């Protein structure tokens, strides 16, 4: 008998997780979710995520798809499951979806943010889990250079130069349609916002790491532009650390929602 298909919108602090994807010997978000759901439903429950966040990466809007017995309505499951989950995971919202819903393949857009702390207090234990405390010699960042890089990232590109080798099929063009890309001020630094139809492994962290190198004068702007058309990632800067990265939102066609979205 078919069950109820739900979308769960998750928030989590990724600091103490070895990423999203379930592993045999490491604590992961998917593993924690599947364990709690299996105990509630008395049978194994598969949790499918919209994306596989890496170790240390956070989420305010990760989307997960589950199929559960009919008696579990979206809101009932959200309330009960939140009582069972550890303190670093929380289900913010839950929706009943069409049977065709797939958390990953149905997504039409994803949005990430990356937070950079520019003041000395960014090294505080109350902030360093969620932002990248930029080293002292990098404090004088050229904001106009950051905006220049962000503007050129907009649009459709083949992001071979900003992706980990071998994480996509050889036939994949690595093409992503970037719909929003900007830097904005925060009370203690800067935040990078980017939205696209898809992202490649480490893509956002490679973009941020390279942009910061350009803005700090360690690389010319032309090097960033060349990476947007490069066939491989040989010249990319090291990726920015994971703690500054957060998955903010995943979007789907409204027709997939059975309950108001």
Image (tube, grey):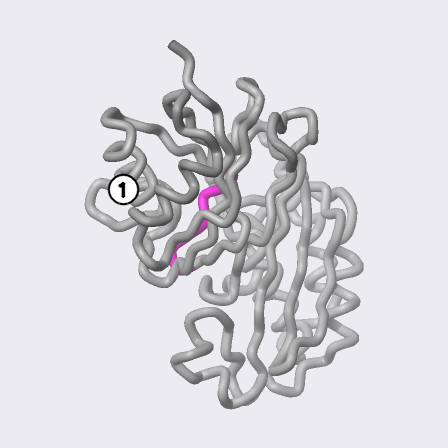
Examine the image and state in which quarter residue 191 appears: bottom right
**What quarter of the picture does the C terminus occupy?**
top right
For residue 67, side relative to residue 183 (left or right): left
For residue 181, side relative to residue 58 (left or right): right
**Magenta stretch: includes residue 53:** yes
Q: How many marks?
A: 1
Secondary element under disc 1, as helix, strand or loop, is loop
Residue linked to disc 1: 23
Between 212 and 171, the one lying in front of the other is: 212
Image height check: is 54 above or below 103?
below
Point 50% across, 72% down: residue: 131
Q: x, y (%) of residue 171? A: 57, 27
Q: Which residues are magenta?
A: 50-56
Point 61% across, 34% down: residue: 107
Image height check: is 132 above or below 37?
below
Q: Main secondary structure of the magenta part?
A: loop
Image height check: is 241 above or below 181?
below
**What quarter of the picture does the N terminus occupy?**
top left
Regarding residue 170, the answer to whether it shows in the image is no
Residue furthest to the left: 25
Examine the image and state in which quarter residue 219 appears: bottom right
Point 37% across, 48% down: residue: 82
Q: Residues within 10 Å of mark 1 (few under 14, many from 20)?
A: few
**Magenta stretch: includes residue 173:** no
Q: x, y (%) of residue 218? A: 62, 77
Regarding residue 112, the answer to whether it shows in the image is yes
Point 79% across, 60% down: residue: 151
Q: x, y (%) of residue 122? A: 50, 82
Image height check: is 23 above or below 153?
above
């Amino acid at each position: 008998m078919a069950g109820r298909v739900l979308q769960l919108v998750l928030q989590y602090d990724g600091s103490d997780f070895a990423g999203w994807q379930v592993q045999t010997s490491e604590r992961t978000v998917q593993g924690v979710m599947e364990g709690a759901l299996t105990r509630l439903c008395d049978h194994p429950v598969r949790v499918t995520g919209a994306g596989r966040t890496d170790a240390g990466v956070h989420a305010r809007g990760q989307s997960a798809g589950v199929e559960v017995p009919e008696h579990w309505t979206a809101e009932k499951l959200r309330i009960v499951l939140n009582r069972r989950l550890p303190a670093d995971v929380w289900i913010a919202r839950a929706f009943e979806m069409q049977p065709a819903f797939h958390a990953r393949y149905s997504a039409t857009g994803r949005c990430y943010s990356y937070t950079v702390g520019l003041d000395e207090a960014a090294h505080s234990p109350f902030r360093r889990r969620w932002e990248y405390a930029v080293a002292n010699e990098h404090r004088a960042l050229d904001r106009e250079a950051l905006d220049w890089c962000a503007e050129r990232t907009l649009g459709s590109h083949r992001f071979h130069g900003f992706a980990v080798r071998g994480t996509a099929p050889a036939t994949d063009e690595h093409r992503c349609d970037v719909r929003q890309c900007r830097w904005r001020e925060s009370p203690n630094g800067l935040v990078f916002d980017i939205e696209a139809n898809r992202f490649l492994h480490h893509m956002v962290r490679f973009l941020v790491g390279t942009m910061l190198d350009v803005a700090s004068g360690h690389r010319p702007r032309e090097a960033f532009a060349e990476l947007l058309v490069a066939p491989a990632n040989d010249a990319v800067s090291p990726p920015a650390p994971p703690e500054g990265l957060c998955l903010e939102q995943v979007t789907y066609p409204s027709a997939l929602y059975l309950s108001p979205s």
